[in-house]
Image (tube, rainbow, N blue to C red):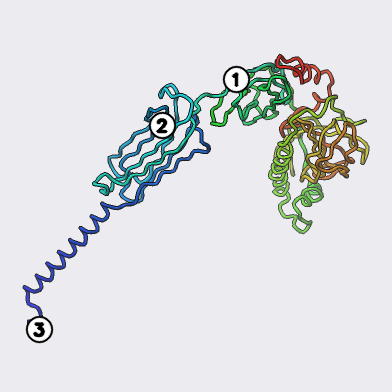
Amino acid sequence: MKLGSLPNAFDLRRMLLYSLLLAIITAGAIWTFLQFERVAPTVNIQLPSDYISTKPLMVKISDRGKGLKKVSISLLAAGKEYPIIAEQFESSVREKNITVTLSRRKLDLRDGPAVLRVLAVDRSYWGFFEGNKTLISKNVTVDLTPPNIQLVIGDRYLNFGGSGVVVYRSSPDTVKSGVKLGHYFFPGTKGHLQDPNAYIVFFAHPYDTPANEKASLVAEDAAGNSGQANLSYSLRNFRLKKRTVTVTDSFIEKKVLPLLGLGLSQRDNLKELFIKVNRELRQDNEAKIRKACEESAKEMLWSETFHQLSNSKVEANFADERTYVYKNETIDHAFHLGYDLAVTRNYPIEAANNGVVVFADNLGIYGNTVIIDHGLGLCTLYSHMSLITVKVADTIKRKQIIGKTGETGLATGDHLHYATLIHGVPVLPLEWWDAKWIKDNILNKIQNTPTGRL
């Protein structure tokens, strides 16, 4: 072809053929490269400890290349391999989440040291067409035996919203145990009785738990295995009272706005502001109460009957259901979780029993508040105080003055809001003021238990 002349038809066909061959070769090279990709699968064993138990564990496997071809999970123990899962995929799988649940009966597996093996193979042609492989081996301890828990002494009767005590035994491998009732859990404490595996637990049938809800003793070991035993008692019907509370604009302006840090110039939609305090702030305050009672002393700090504030009169009962009405509209509901004790203005407040102060500060709707820990999860709360004269970590004696009554928080008049709590759960205070009830239902049961005395 002369310089400057146009290519003839033959030359065009040849150029097109070369281009097509180049494209085919390039595509083939890319296809071959993709088929022989060398990115191995990723294996993530979600095991919170070195134990393998009856508690399910999750294994997450993924491949960002050709996709997964097969996976297998097994245990090596005592020179024997125990297959758990073996799965092959007909088509490419990018991600596979596998839940592993071991069964002693199915595997005939004994407790002890083992190796957990997870093998993942992808669909690559690498490795002589066998694919990229990821093999993860993890040393574990097999523990499929749940703790053994047994009731030693319990309660035949319990008041609705009231307290009880249980003594039980649990096997030495127990790391967590107690009474479970609905969504509540009351942890047990050991070290008080001659039997080193004996526990004491104060618990309650809370005011908001249905009467037909069944309680049980539960225990968990370090591996996550759990055992349980039935806990049976007859529930006495404690009738909860209902009360209607009228909410006024002046109450919201005087009591609610300051709790939200608002002034009278920000009084738009008073109803919504009241609901915000009565729901959100109340929930936050009650969470702080539970938190303060969490680190309770591991021993009983008291020995005498709990003391009712001198010369006081109960004006509002425990677990009264209050309906709040604003301008003839029902806007909210709440439970009054203590006693309102009426005395003279700025009356000296006496501690109900020996203990240690675990909270002494302002607490939203409760105003100035003191919480005293009496050990084993038992606490008392004193609210709406005008003055606090103790601080956190102070050791308190029964009838010691801890401050003065007032009307801080949502209180509408000078009084003491007094509450009794078990692991942060409000319970009927009246029981703990009753010397006979304490002797029959608490002290005698603990001291007469076959496992030994306190």
Observer able to see residue 177: yes
**Could you give the CA–CA distance between mark 3 and mark 2, rounded to whole angstroms?**
77 Å
Say what amino acid the circle numbered 1 marks: Ala
Q: Nearer the viewer, residue 218 or 301?
A: 301
Query: Looking at the picture, how far across and down is residue 4, in whole percent?
Result: 12, 85
Q: Which quadrant is home to the N terminus? A: bottom left
Q: Report the residue at 79% width, 31% height from top.
A: 374
In the image, farthest residue toward the front: 79
Q: Earlier in the sequence, mark 3 or mark 1?
A: 3
Is 131 situated above or below 353?
below
Asked which secondary structure carries label 3, the reply is loop
Q: Which quadrant is home to the C terminus? A: top right
Residue underneath mark 2 = 75
Residue underneath mark 1 = 229
Horizontal placement of 347 versus 170: left or right? right
Q: Earlier in the sequence, mark 3 or mark 2?
A: 3
Task: Identify the disc placed on residue 5.
Answer: 3
Say what amino acid the circle numbered 3 marks: Ser
